Image: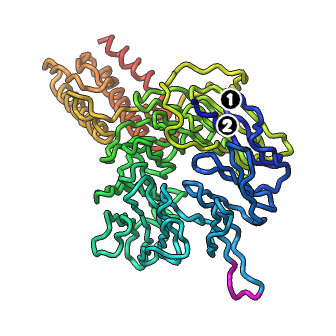
Amino acid sequence: MAPSTPLLTVRGSEGLYMVNGPPHFTESTVFPRESGKNCKAYTFSKDGTLFAWGNGEKINVISVTTKGLLHSFDLPKAVCLEFSPKNTVLATWQPYTTSKDDTAGIPNLQLYDLKTGTCLKSFIQKKMQNWCPSWSEDETLCARNVNNEVHFFENNNFNTIANKLHLKKINDFVLSPGPQPYKVAVYVPGSKGAPSFVRLYQYPNFDEPHAALANKSFFKADKVTMLWNKKATAVLVIASTDVDKTGASYYGEQTLHYIATNGESAVVQLPKNGPIYDVVWNSSSTEFCAVYGFMPAKATVFNLKCDPVFDFGTGPRNAAYYSPHGHILVLAGFGNLRGQMEVWDVKKYKLISKPVASDSTYFAWCPDGEHILTATCAPRLRVNNGYKIWHYTGSVLHKYDVPSNAELWQVSWQPFLDGIFPEKAITYQVVPSDVPSEEPKAATAYRPPALRNKPVTNSKLHEEEPPQNMKPQPGNEKPLSKTALKNQRKHEAKKAAKQEARSDKSPDTAPAPAPQSTPRNTVSQATSGDPETDKKIKNLKKKLKAIEQLKEQAAAGKQLEKNQLEKIQKEKALLQELEDLELGI
């Protein structure tokens, strides 16, 4: 039996409702529309069979398959909802308050049994950040961070703490995905000159002297993000500082670390300086993609040895999204960028399409691995709210624009378990659509009044780097790094200059044949016999050599001055002049 199409849930000032997924896009009868602006939160269960939402009075839970109401909880202030992985428990959170006499706080984190509808346990959870307990996929284990300790509960028995992981000032932890044995990554920030560190443990081995599976310490870290791969064999750690003391970046400073459960660890060497915008694992757990560097940002796929596999070059991007099957990668520039997307076939590293989703604040892959959702939501942007459904080949299949007096707050796909939708072969043919395509307006660069009636120059602020396969080809040498290529060009330029100096000293001697690797601006060393012409040729060569060096600096990311850019533009004219002089020899 073919799986049903994922539903789309929409929450905004027009109310809460569901829309059928591709190809119909009609309002769904699974969930009757809730009008009004009181819905603060909604969530699906991990398998998409249950749906919970709050309407400002109660938290209701329905079955998506039978469309029947299962439970209703009297929680008017709840703003966060989450199902446990096997739909046994519903966790709810509301803002923390104290009692009238200010002596004790009121428990604001509730855990409800979805079979009986009773409250299993209530906890005090002051912060909204990391409010939800973390369950293992089989619900054997559940963990919470309490007063710098990680408390573990087994089989949803929340009255007894089965185990504790105690380290001084544990700031954050992440449970590993997948089956047993369970692993946990913990982060402890540095203090009094001691470094911060991330450690990996296997449950329940916490107390032995060498219990940690792996340990990685670093000094530059005010906060970290820890990302397990799907097979729970390794963790990527993005360590961030709030302030870059060198003053190079407004965004602070970030470093990327790799830690494996077998004890291996490494700093991932990123070839371009600047912020790390996004890091994401492929579902295969063997590769990850990082988007990093000052704009235009680089994007690179690395293997488990932290060696680059494929470099996508530079472009206007700050996010990466692998499809659920891991066979397609989308690189995108959202937020303060124009919404340009690059859709890549990961197996062939071939570009599929380059759609533009202007003003987008949200992106999500459909569980079927074929469709993409982009949306513009409030409060990030309060104008032009709406959403679009795309096919990965670049065509817009459905578009909804919210009326100008309304807002869109949230939109998301109904989740499905892995394996429900089979992986389909990638197509490069654009899928036909009834939605008329909108050509994005070409943004013209600002020109000061003094230059508006003058011819446009084609100078670029940044020299964009093309995509490059970093895998060593069989029978070929390993590709040279950017620094090695730069050094090689310098060496060749020096060699050519020496050759030129020798020919100038001995004009009667026949010139030696130029090496094959000589740069194109180096020409044959014959003399004209006219000292004036020889002098002109020599000066032209000097200018062309200086231009070559400026181009190398621009390629390395250095920002050139206006007069330097003008020098580069004169290269063609200088080459022509040199050619004319030599033809007259």
Please, what is the three-letter code of the amino acid marked with disc 1? Pro
2 or 1: tag closer to the N-terminus: 2
Rendering quarter of residue 17: top right
Q: Is residue 323 visible?
A: no
Residue name at image x 32 percent, y 23 percent: 520
Asked whether disc 2 touches disc 1, contact meaning CB atoms under 8 Å apart, the reply is yes
Q: Is residue 386 left or right of residue 135?
A: right
Residue matched to label 2: 358
Q: In this view, does 342 lie to the left or right of 42?
A: left
Q: Position of residue 480 (x, y in %)?
A: 28, 36
Q: In this view, does 386 lie to the left or right of 504?
A: right
| Neighbour tally class for label 2: few under 14, some 14-19, many 20 plus, Cα within 10 Å | some
Query: Which of 133/74 is in front?
Result: 74
Q: Quadrant of the C terminus?
A: top left
The image's mark for residue 73 is none
Please, what is the three-letter code of the amino acid marked with disc 2? Ser
Element assignment for label 1: loop
Q: Position of residue 70 (x, y in %)?
A: 72, 54
Q: Position of residue 83 (x, y in %)?
A: 61, 57
Residue matched to label 1: 440
Residue stretch in magenta: 101-106
For the stretch drawn in magenta, the main secondary structure is loop
Query: Which of 117/256 is in front?
Result: 117
| Neighbour tally class for label 1: few under 14, some 14-19, many 20 plus, Cα within 10 Å | few
